[in-house]
Image (tube, grey):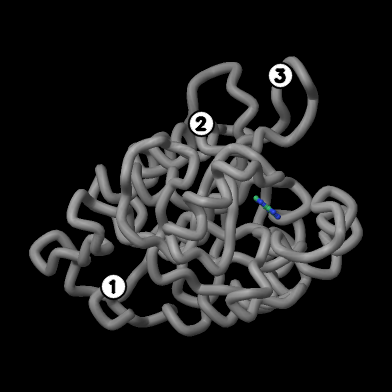
Amino acid sequence: MAPPQDGKAAEVKEESVPQRPISDVVFIIAMKKEASPLVEKFQLTEESNSLFPKGVPWVRYSGKYKDLNINIVSPGKDIVLGVDSVGTVSASLITYASIQALQPDLIINAGTAGGFKAKGACIGDVYLASDVAFHDRRIPIPIGKLSTGDSLDMCPHDETAIIANDATVKDMEGAAVAYVADLLRTPAIFLKAVTDIVDGDRPTTEEFLENLAAVTAALDQAATRVVDFINGKNPLEL
Ligand code: ADE
C-alpha cells in the first residue's frame, strides 16, 4: 500500500473490500522482458481493443487462469525513444487507467529490482514487499522496505534516503503504483526480483542486463505461486 503521512502502510479497509473471492487481477509490469514469461505462463492474449486512450503505447494482455480474470498491463515503448517506458510516471498512469477501466480486486506490481546485500538480498531472490516508499522526493517520508525512484543507478543523496527508508530492494515503479492504488482504494502487492546488488562491486547496468533473463524466470515462478495462492481467496484473507 502507499505510505500515508504517518508512515504505516495503509490497511485494506474492510468496508471497501468485496466479501467474495478475488476474481479480477491486474499485473502492472514495466518491461516487455519482465512481462513476456507471465503472458505465456497464463496463456494471455494481447487485446487489440484497448480500453485506454487512443494513441497511447500501453499494452494489455488478458485471459482466464483458474478462477481468475488476469490482465497484464505494460506501458509499452516510449513513442520518441522506442524503449520500455520504465519509471514512476508511466507506472502511475497505467495503474490509474487500469483501475478505472477494469475495476480489479487486486493490483500486482511485478518486476525486477536492485537488492542490498547489507540486507541479505541475493541475485534471483524474489521479494514480496511489505511497505514501499519513494527515495528521490526530498520530503521526509516514513519507513519503506521497497524504495522507488526514477533512476537505475544510485547517487549519494539517494543512498542516504534509501538507507533511511530501510530498504532491502530498490525499484522504479512500486511506490508510484502504491500511490495510485491507495488513492483509488484498490489493494496492491509488490513482487520484486533482484537482478543486481546495489551495494555490491559490479556496475549496476552490466549486472542488471546480465541477470535480466534468468531473474525474470524466478519472478515468473514467484508470480505464479502468488496467483495460485490468491485463487479462491477474498482480499481480507491475504
Ligand atoms: N530494477 C532492477 N535493478 C534496479 C535498480 N538497481 N534500481 C532500480 N530499479 C531496478
Q: Amino acid at mark 2?
A: Val
Task: Give the crowd class for mark 3: few <14, some 14-19, many >=20 residues within 10 Å.
Answer: few
Callouts 1 and 2 close, C-beta under 8 Å:
no
Q: Position of residue 170 (x, y in %)?
A: 58, 57
Task: Give the crowd class for mark 1: few <14, some 14-19, many >=20 residues within 10 Å.
Answer: many
Q: Circle 2 is placed at which residue position?
A: 89
Rendered image: mark on residue 235:
1
Relative depth, front residue between 136 and 221: 136
Q: Amino acid at mark 1?
A: Pro
State which quarter of the image contains the N terminus: bottom left
Name which of mark 3 and mark 1 comes first in the sequence: 3
Please say whether residue 69 is visible from this viewpoint.
yes
Name which of mark 2 and mark 3 comes first in the sequence: 3
Q: Circle 3 is placed at which residue position?
A: 79
Label 2 and label 3: CA atoms lie apart by: 14 Å
Q: Residue furthest left?
A: 15
Q: Position of residue 78 (x, y in %)?
A: 70, 25
